Amino acid sequence: MIWESIANIPTPLLLSFVTGGLVLNLAPGQDVFFASACGVQGGPKAGALAGLGVGAGVIFHVVLATVGLGAVVAAHPGALLAIKWIGAGYLLFLAWQSWHADGGHARVRGTGNPLSIIRRGALSNILNPKPVLFLLAFLPQFTKAEYGPVWHQILGLGLIFAVTGTLVTMGYGIAAGWLGARLGARMSVMNRIASVMFTALALRMVTK
């Protein structure tokens, strides 16, 4: 079983993995900024749902890494480049929606729909090629054949990383939503801020 293999990993090594994962997740990156942008625009609930969606995207990458598809994608720069530009285009589309949203009471179409927010969060992560490379570099460092089937370890550790990362990202989204609500600014201002953040994410994706 997967969790039996995880239980065979020495406790200090497992704690080192969890600690390292938390440090990486706490460092603001694309996922954090995306959830924060959604929180600023739609409030704490939207920020939390965006973080949940991002977590679903991480699980997608974990599954890819487990079955080996992540390695195949990583070995083909053309595929990574295509995913990167598609992801940047998606973020720019969200930026355009946010900038042109009604500043009175309306928000970006679908922003108030929980499933839509989760879907946007998942897509923002799935269309980012960096998690593929990161998981392939990070997870194997904590696996050994003597602990059990390596794919069990990759999947189990990946799920742990996804859960802790999701909680951290949701926390950022909630905090950003709370701060946006406390500012008492007009929704148009919040939409413009979110638009700028989405645009910055798109630029960051294609320049790094």
Image (tube, rainbow, N blue to C red):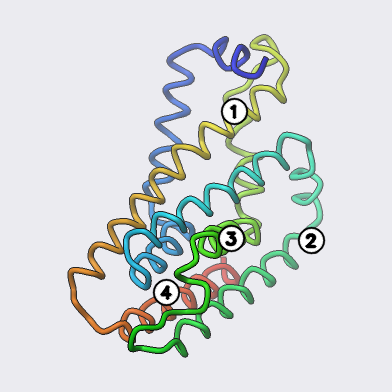
Is 136 on the left-hand or right-hand side of 177?
right
The residue wearing badge 1 is 141
Q: Are marks 3 and 1 in contact (CB under 8 Å)?
A: no
Query: x, y percentage for residue 198?
Result: 48, 74
Disc 4/disc 3 C-alpha distance (Å) = 18 Å
Disc 2/disc 3 C-alpha distance (Å) = 22 Å
Please state which of the two labelled residues, at mark 3 or mark 1, is closer to the viewer. Answer: 3
Please state which of the two labelled residues, at mark 2 or mark 4, is closer to the viewer. Answer: 4
Compared to residue 195, the image places residue 21 above or below, namely above
The residue wearing badge 4 is 197
Query: x, y percentage for residue 25?
Result: 42, 45
The residue wearing badge 3 is 119
Disc 4/disc 1 C-alpha distance (Å) = 33 Å
Going from the N terminus, do you reach mark 1 or mark 2 first? 2
**Element under label 1?**
helix
Q: Quadrant of the C terminus?
A: bottom right
Q: Amino acid at mark 2?
A: Ala
Q: Amino acid at mark 3?
A: Arg
Going from the N terminus, do you reach mark 3 or mark 1 first? 3
Q: Residues within 10 Å of mark 3 (few under 14, many from 20)?
A: some
Going from the N terminus, do you reach mark 4 or mark 1 first? 1
The residue wearing badge 2 is 79
Q: Residues within 10 Å of mark 1 (few under 14, many from 20)?
A: few
Query: x, y percentage for residue 55?
Result: 53, 47
Identify which residue is drawn at 52% across, 31% down.
Answer: 160
**Element under label 4?**
helix
